Image (cartoon, rainbow, N blue to C red):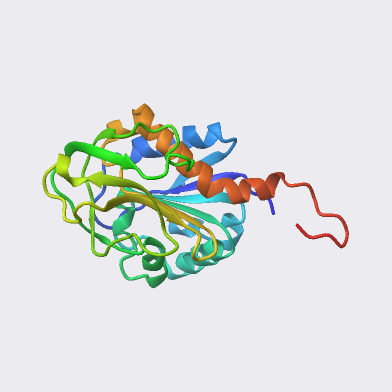
Amino acid sequence: MPTSDVLVYTRTAGYRHDSIPAGARALTELAAELGLAAETTDDPGAFTAERLERCAAVVLLSTTGRVLTDPAREALEAYVRAGGGLLAVHAAANAEPDWPFYGALLGTRFAGHPPLQPGLVHVEDPAHPATAGLPEPWHWTDEWYDFTAHPRRPGVHVLLRADESTYEGGTHGADHPLAWCHENLGGRFLFTALGHTPESYATPAFRTHLTGCLHWTTRGRREERHAPPARDGQQR
């Protein structure tokens, strides 16, 4: 199966972050470092089986509200269930509010956030590609998203958590996940709540985080692309 690129989707039907252009540029640059081209689009018509066949991963970059048509939802769900990678960034926690499959991927929904302010992020798994190389603790400024349900559950691997003692307005207490991943629905899904400001995407630590997110979500398809062809009667 040929896979060659990353599809960065930026459509919004609710609040639109002014960081989206900076995020799309950064993701294009970081994908290139992994040997992948990136296409940025806000057209739901891009979500077809034929188009997604070429994708190493899809990125939902601060998408808000209902941003996919029914056929696009069907194509994306089939892609993920068949092993495709999906990376959801920041406000993508507030996307597709009436789509059960996406809700199952997230495991929760966006509930709100306090004002933009500095705080500390703790790395739960420094060996994971999405968190390797990050400082511990990580001094960061963001919106510190709260969620309608606790994201930590069986099969979900929490990567980052907020230290609510270092900022005002958190609602989850001592265990406040900010980034997590899983493979519970066939493909690789990773969500990071960080990335509100345009400046975030020029920050070395956040670019390290995003590079690792892309590395993990695209790995299955990248390995598939570079694997040698199977011999007759041999499976891989």
Quadrant placement of the C terminus: bottom right
Residue 195 x, y percent position in the rendering: 31, 41
Q: Residue furthest left?
A: 168
Left or right: where 225 falls relative to 150: right
Identity of the residue drawn at 36% across and 60% down: 67
Where 148 sits versus 7, above or below?
below
Left or right: where 72 falls relative to 219: left
In this rendered view, identify the residue nearer to me: 44 or 55: 55
In this rendered view, identify the residue nearer to me: 42 or 174: 174
Q: Residue furthest right?
A: 232
Residue 47 x, y percent position in the rendering: 50, 59
Residue 36 x, y percent position in the rendering: 58, 39
Identity of the residue drawn at 38% across and 27% down: 204
The total number of labels drawn is 0
Identity of the residue drawn at 24% across and 38% down: 120
Where 156 sits versus 98, above or below?
above
Residue 1 x, y percent position in the rendering: 69, 54
Identity of the residue drawn at 26% across and 53% down: 175
Where 182 sits versus 136, above or below?
below
